[in-house]
Image (spheres, grey):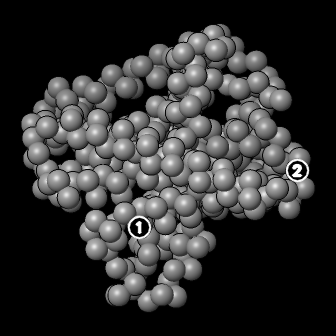
Amino acid sequence: MKKRIIGLDILRVLGIVFIFLYHVTDSYVGLGGTGDGVFSSLALFSILSRPASIFLFLISGFALMYNREGELKLKDYYIRRFKSLYIPFYVAYILMLGIGVVLLKWAPWNYIPKRKFVYTILGIDGLAVKYSPNYYLIGEWFMSCIVICYLLFPLLAILIKKAKYLTLCVLFAAYVILANFINPFELSVFINPLFIIFYFYVGMCLKGWLIDNQISKAVKIISVVLSIGILFIYLADSLFTTKQIIACTESEAELLCFIWSIALVIAFKDINLKEGAILAKIIKYLSGISWYVILVHHVLAIIYFTINGVSENLVRDFVIILALSIILAEVVRRITNLIKKLVFK
């Protein structure tokens, strides 16, 4: 069994925290919240959530290569992905829809054509909703993109053996063109699977660069300095200055987030915790339920603020929503594991 890389578990948990803070604050503001410092906090969390999304895609590609998923038979690979991705998605969807129906009298089937539920079944409703209303509820654009990345992984695993750097150059060219020149799609380039696939593939490459080959101490030090330095600049930019420190275009900001994400993966990869230590157990548990938290937390925040209204005590709301998210994530995890035992014996 492959040795668990606890540093990447820590980074995964950190990414979920960044995304959680952004979505809860965004839901609070969207429903009328105007507490002290909330808008500067929203700006900061919005910035932090982007590299979080990027390094989660990097880690996803890395993990599949690290666990040698590319060596599985296609049937076995896709069954594994269905079990780990779709079953939790369906369970979380039914759970959160049920809560919405009971507490808020949701009834989307009354005004949305039922045929559009196919997007939810396929797990791509988060992107399809950008074009027209459907039954989208959880997972956001992230679910849609990771579905497509996982679908293409067997092909990418072949290409990484046959034409690793040619494939990297082609994907990077598409990345640059979409970000800077032509975006023929009616959705933001930054949530376009054709754009995101580059991050996923770089994550796949990172397995070879970080595990099969040794990263020099100088590169590790530079990565740590970059990780801390960029974070400090963004903190100062969002919370302590009235004039923007980093003035750049969206595509330049995206590239900076990508560089930051790579630096974070390198910096965190060799972090180690004593096996069996309480902190290590907590990190492993939170990393293990991270996908379930991603699925439930955003709609939970919307339900929470819709029922309770927005108060001046956003910190208290953060704590309550986080606790509820972990509880619901655990419920989703247990139901998912039960379904796996019953269906995939």
Q: Residue at x 47, y 36 (%)?
A: 15
On residue 72, the disc is: 2
Residue 258 position in % (x across, y down): 51, 39
Q: Is residue 129 visible?
A: yes
**Image coordinates for residue 191, horizontal then vertical, percent:** 48, 58
Q: Which part of the image, by quadrant, shows the N terminus?
A: top right
The answer to whether residue 243 is left or right of residue 3 is: left
* Residue 31, numbered circle: none
The picture quadrant where one finds residue 101 is bottom left
Residue 174 drawn at (x, y percent) = 61, 58
Q: Nearer the viewer, residue 183 or 160?
A: 160
* Crowding near the residue tagged with mark 1, few <14, some 14–19, many ≥20 C-alpha atoms within 10 Å: some
Left or right of residue 70: residue 167? left
Q: Amino acid at mark 2?
A: Leu
At a point 34% along the width and 87% down the height, the residue shown is 111
Q: Which residue is denoted by mark 1 in the rendering?
A: 98
Q: Position of residue 175 (x, y in %)?
A: 57, 54
329 left or right of 7 in image: left
| Residue name at image x 56 percent, y 80 percent | 118
Q: In the figure, 135 relative to 283: above or below?
A: below
Q: Quadrant of the C terminus?
A: bottom right
Left or right? Give the position of 107 relative to 15.
Answer: left
Q: Local crowd at mark 2 within 10 Å, few (<14), some, or many (≥20)?
A: few
Q: Residue at x 74, y 43 (%)?
A: 64
Which kind of residue does numbered mark 1 sit on? Gly
Q: Secondary structure at mark 2?
A: loop
